[in-house]
Structures are given as C-alpha cells and as structure tokens.
Amino acid sequence: MLFHSIEFAFFLPIVFILYWFVTNKKIKVQNTLLLIVSYIFYGWWDWRFLSLIAFSSFVDFFVGVKLKHTQNDKQRKLLLLISIIVNLGFLGFFKYFNFFAENFSQAFTLLGQPISVARLNIVLPVGISFYTFQTLSYSIDVYRRKLEPTTDIIAFFAFVSFFPQLVAGPIERATNLLPQFYKKREFDHNNAVDGMRQILWGLFKKVVIADNCAIFVNDIFANYTTYSGSTLLLGTFFFAFQIYGDFSGYSDIAIGTANLFGFKLMRNFAFPYFSRDIAEFWRRWHISLSTWFRDYLYIPLGGSKGSVLKKVRNLFIIFVVSGFWHGANWTFIVWGGLNAVYFLPLMLLKKNRKNTNSVAEGRFIPNLKDLFQMGITFFLTSIAWIFFRAKSIPIALNYIAKIFSISLFSVPEKIADMSYILIFLFIFIIIEWAQREKQHALEFDEIKIHRSLRWVIYSSIFTLIFLYLGDHHEFIYFQF
C-alpha cells in the first residue's frame, strides 16, 4: 500500500478512528489492532510474504526469551548466531543469491573454466532490508544486555511490523520504539497537528518534487548518449533531488503518521544538502541506517581507534557494506567506496567532526565560504549518485565522461520543458533553507506565523499535490 494512494487515504482515517475511539485506549487492544492493520498494510502488496516477516519476528522473540534465562556465554552466542543466520539468511537469499551466483560463474569463466549456475526467479520482498535490521537490533541489544527482553509477543510483533515505517524506515532501534508499545498512549492534539504537517510536506516532496524530477531523470539516464554534458549534469542534479524527495518524503510521512498514534520515531533526514562536507552529509542522510552501521559494525570493528590502517579499513568496510545493503549490483558497491574516498581526507586530518551545527546558524544569508562548501559537497554527492542510478559501472563511467566533455558548456536540451520543475526546486530549497534548524520544513512557530498565512501555505501545497497526483510512482527505496 502506497502512502500517496487512494487506498491509504481511506486506510489511515479508519485505523485512526478504531485506534482512538473503539479500543478505549487499552494498550493490549491497541497493540493488537496495530499488529493486524500493519499486516494488512504489508499484505496489500503481496500477502505471501507475511509468513516471512512473521517467522523472522518469532525467531527473534524466541531468541530474546531464551537469552533472558541463559547466562552461559557459549549458549548466548549460539542464540545470537541463530538470529543473525535467520535474518541475514533470508536477506541474502532473496536479495543477493543471483548476484553471487552470477559473479561466481563469471569468475570461473575468466579462469577458463566456464560453469553454468542456476538463476532463481524470485521476488524481493518489499522492506526486507529495513525490518531485518530492525528486528536484528533487538537480538543484538538483548545479547549485549542493553535491553530487557520482552515477553509480550503482541507488542514485539507490532514493533517489528509497525506500518508507518515498515517498508522504508526509519530503521528503528528496539531500545527506542519497543518500550513505547508498553506505555499507555494519550492523544496529543499538538503532536497530531505537527504529524499532519509533516505528512503534508512528505507528500509534497514525493509527489511534486521527486515524481516530477523522475520524468526527466528517467529520460536522460535512458538516453544519455544522445544528450549534451550540460543536460546530463542537470539530470544528475535532478536525480539528487528525486532520491532526496522520494526517500525523505517517505520518512516524513512515516514519522508524521506515527505521531498520530502517539509514537515517536527517530529523525531520518536533517536537510542533508545543506552540508558543508561529506562527514556532515552522512550525519544528516538516512540517519537510522548510518547510526545502525556505526553501532553494530563500525564500533565493534574498532571504529576510529587503533592504527591508521585499521581506521581506513573500518571506514571502507562500513561504506562498502552500506552500498551493498542498497542493492545487489557492483554500482552500489562503487557508490559506497566512492563516498569512503570522499570521507577519507576528513578522517585522516581529524576534521570529520568539524561541522556539527547548522550552517549559517541564526542567519538567513550564508557567507561565501558556506556557499562554496555546500556547493562542493552537493556536487561530489551528486556525482556519486550517478553510480547509484546507473544500471552498470561502464554506463556510469560513460555518463560521467560525457558530462565533462565540451558539450558541458552548451545550453541543456529541453530546458524550456524543465522550467516548471526548476521553479518548484527553487521554492523547495528556499523553504527548506528557512526551516533548516527545525525538525521538518512545516514546523511553524505559531506565534510568529499567523494562522491565515499558515493556511495559505497548507492550501497551496495541498493543491500542488492534488494536481500532480497522477500515476503512482513507487518509492525508490521499496527496491531495497
């Protein structure tokens, strides 16, 4: 079920009414309702994969219960290993089997021993990378004794399948989200209003910004050999905004929807394109995944401690694994490695924590240094996105080579057709810039912003969403 579909427009208010007015605010009943509607939400896409998420949930619930009553270190490690094998086993089978099979076959072919490897015709379950990491964090935290294991199976299953963030995050930690299923939730008008605002802005990002950028991105990347370097560069920038609007838009809708039901999800994006270096960008982009890899992979490997060689090793491991998490293609691995290369000088010079505050804090107009740093960071990030979007490494390299040809200095083709999205992007950037110190772009100070002006903004955004809510484009991150 898509957030911007007519089905969800009926689904959400029905669930809201049942949750607050029929369940009588009883925690057990509310959690049961959330579990049922979450499975309906997920099963709307393909009911067959409900068994997969249910089995994964059961395994980790069972592991948690057993860990609670087990003090023997070897037995505890075995239980954690079961959780890791089951979760990563499912993920590896559905997402990476064909990738490894094909590369295994190609490796033997290069050695002069061609072999035939069967390729499975399997569908990748939507959101498997997200809920796998979410439930896995529970087992790891219980094993580390950072979290008391639950005996409430309904609460745990609802935590794993919580529909607002089930298929594309944020990837919630059990330490943050699971305890919220134990507490009585009281309806908070202010939280609900703020949630509706964030949902509205998320829909604007997805429908108006991302989906309109996608029209030109799809055409330019599919026919890049026929376009000039200037058009390809513009297509690269459009994709940067497409993936940002698409993915952060989903996160905004998820966080806003969770607010309606009395839950607080972690922030997943913090205006990343206003970053002054790559390190700051990765503190602001897909925060739930970045911090997941930091806590469960980077730090256990040694993090930034030890020799320079170990630091570099750990840096490349976390970025390459992050790239591979996104998809079973060498393009994603190169994308991750390229970001590691960007990050490396900052780490070696110990400047990766230099920019931790908001850019031009307290000022509307940034200085030239801020503008230059943001421009360079955005450009480098956009070039890396080419590998993320391209179907193969040779295509990405040819695309980049053509950007830096003499045709870069020509007028982009179809620039007149692109004028409307350029105007939307300009307005979008101005609004996000003005609100960059807020949690989201429609978080208004009601004392400073008069109600009539707020409603003009809401109405304008709603009208644009309605006008461009044509063909439903799936969220990009559904494929991961």
Image (spheres, grey):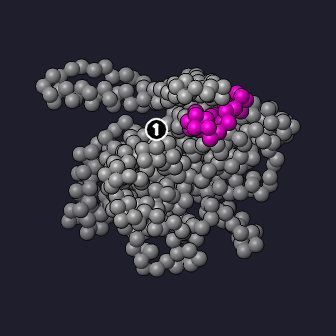
Q: Is residue 457 left or right of residue 401?
A: right
Which of the 4 quarters of the picture holds residue 376? bottom left
Q: In terms of secondary structure, what is the magenta stretch mainly?
A: helix
Q: Of the residues shown, which amino acid type is indicated by label 1?
A: Gln
Q: Position of residue 14 (x, y in %)?
A: 75, 38
Q: Which residue is mark 1?
A: 479
In the image, what residue occupies the spot 68% across and 57% down?
197
Q: Position of residue 478 (x, y in %)?
A: 50, 39
Residue lying at the far front in this picture: please name it: 72
Which quadrant, please, contains the N terminus?
top right
Answer above or below: position of 406 versus 189.
below
Answer above or below: position of 108 versus 321.
above
Q: Position of residue 138 (x, y in %)?
A: 60, 36
**Residue 257 seen in render:** no
Q: Is residue 406 magenta?
A: no
In the image, what residue occupies the spot 46% across and 43% down?
300
Q: Position of residue 161 (x, y in %)?
A: 63, 34
Callout 1: helix, strand or loop? helix
In the image, what residue occupies the spot 62% across and 50% down?
266
Range covered by the magenta-colored residues: 137-162
Q: Is residue 146 magenta?
A: yes
